[in-house]
Image (cartoon, rainbow, N blue to C red):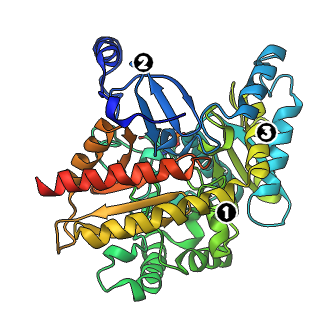
Amino acid sequence: MTLTRSAITVPGPRSTLLHQRKTAAVAAGVGTALPVYVERAEGAVLIDVDGNRLIDFGSGIAVTSVGHAAPRVVEAVRRQAAEFTHTCFMVTPYEEYVAVAEQLNDLTPGAHEKRSALFNSGAEAVENAVKVARHHTGRPAVIAFDHAYHGRTNLTMALTAKNMPYKHRFGPFANEVYRAPMAYPYRWPTGPAVCAAEAFDQFVALVRTQVGAENTAAVIIEPIQGEGGFIVPAPGFLARVADWCDLHGIVLIADEIQTGFCRTGDWFASEFEGVVPDIVTTAKGIAGGLPLAGVTGRADIMDSVHSGGLGGTYGGNPVACAAALATIETMWAEDLCGAARRVESVLRPGLTALAGEYDAIGEVRGRGAMLAVELVRGGTKEPDADLAARVSAFCHRAGLITLTCGTYGNVLRFLPPLVIEDALLHEGLEILGDAFAAAVAR
Ligand code: PLZ
């Protein structure tokens, strides 16, 4: 699809009308980043109801890694929907669920024997990973990190660090959740060089003094933090935490819901650091847009739960499973891990060049097709959420879907479908350049 930048009016009249209906019909708590209503999409381009073309640098929050309307996924969904759409795996099972479990066991880090269970959403996967870890260890406590995001259900809200908009007035939250500092190099008070070692020492001290390793079921961590600001932990931090968990019989849960399935240039981001988690949670990119999530772990941990202890009506829905199998096939066939690295090779130099021009860009970071810039007031490290919002709004008006994130709301993140053409990446960078020129000059 070609892009006609000049023709764009966002939101157009049809979207505006739909948005009025949305306001009258949909609960106010369900927000939208841009009030543009989508009619169809292909690859890395969305077409809205007014005929505007938008370049997608968001992938529906890291979901459509294989691209919108990926041919294998479309065909698999069609075929499966015509055969059967639901039986409930807990009643009468079907092959597709088993095949997805086999794929997950095969693709996630580590050559050990594994088992998987399937669910509908990332939050549900995290809930179940914690259930399994508690059941296996017989211990109550879970350690999460500053800037973590794990979902919006009660337990996952407790695991999530950020108050607004996720937790504000939604408590009380699940108990036995403790929070350790994250090895966040850019904001580590004594500098990035000592970040991994100091953050690890503080993590250990926290567990020892406030919780007790013998009371700790699990440590849950995103190998690159997503909603918290695309924070890449200081090198070595993850491995130290993993080794320490191992030493104390604590289940290490890697939440790869945002980082998994080729997004960072590997099948899973844990691999980059050579970390083999005990349990991996997956969702988002796994099924090309269909709702599916997985919990994959060491066979002895996963199989410790009694039969009937895990499940749900829709978990591992056959249409979602068929989509996942087609997604994984596409990732192999089109080398989408390589594609993520190609995206980085185009985007990172562009972002670095922008950072050279604007001291409001404090840091360019991320890996593969999971890149971000952290915005600050020029010459300081004071977060500038306002600027992130202005740049993002400019991009939206110019037909580029960008998302913000970060504990301080000051991070612009870029996570296009991995199949995106280089020309669209360059086009997006150009719009971003215009956006900085307009927003910083203001
Ligand atoms: N774990 C690491 O990134 C979802 C949230 C969007 P669900 N991130 C996008 C929003 O504002 O709700 C996410 C994640 C990580 C868990 C989740 C939760 O996944 O499928 O949204 O439940």
> How far apart, in angstroms, are the residues tagged by discs 2 and 1?
36 Å
> How far apart, in angstroms, are the residues tagged by discs 1 and 3?
18 Å
Residue positioned 60% across, 58% down in the render: 340
Q: Is residue 88 visible?
A: yes
Q: Is residue 406 visible?
A: no
- Assess disc 2: are there few (<14), some (14-19) or many (≥20) residues with their C-alpha within 10 Å of its C-alpha: some
Give residue 35's quadrant in the image.
top left
Residue positioned 60% across, 34% down in the render: 68
**Residue 437, how many percent across, how many down?**
21, 56
SS type, badge 1: loop
In this picture, is 226 found above or below 321?
below
Any mark on residue 266, and which? 1
Any mark on residue 325, and which? 3
Any mark on residue 49, and which? 2
Q: Mark 2 or mark 3, which is nearer the start of the sequence?
A: 2
> How far apart, in angstroms, are the residues tagged by discs 3 and 2?
31 Å
Q: Mark 1 or mark 2, which is nearer the start of the sequence?
A: 2
SS type, badge 2: loop
SS type, badge 3: helix
Q: Is residue 285 left or right of residue 194?
A: right
Q: Nearer the viewer, residue 365 or 239?
A: 365
**Residue 65, how many percent across, how many down?**
61, 45
- Assess disc 3: are there few (<14), some (14-19) or many (≥20) residues with their C-alpha within 10 Å of its C-alpha: many
Q: How many marks?
A: 3
Residue most extreme to the right: 95
Q: Nearer the viewer, residue 331 or 134?
A: 331
Tell me which amino acid carries mark 3.
Leu
Residue positioned 48% across, 80% down in the render: 200
Tell me which amino acid carries mark 2.
Val
Give residue 198's quadrant in the image.
bottom left
**Residue 303, how many percent across, how many down?**
81, 51
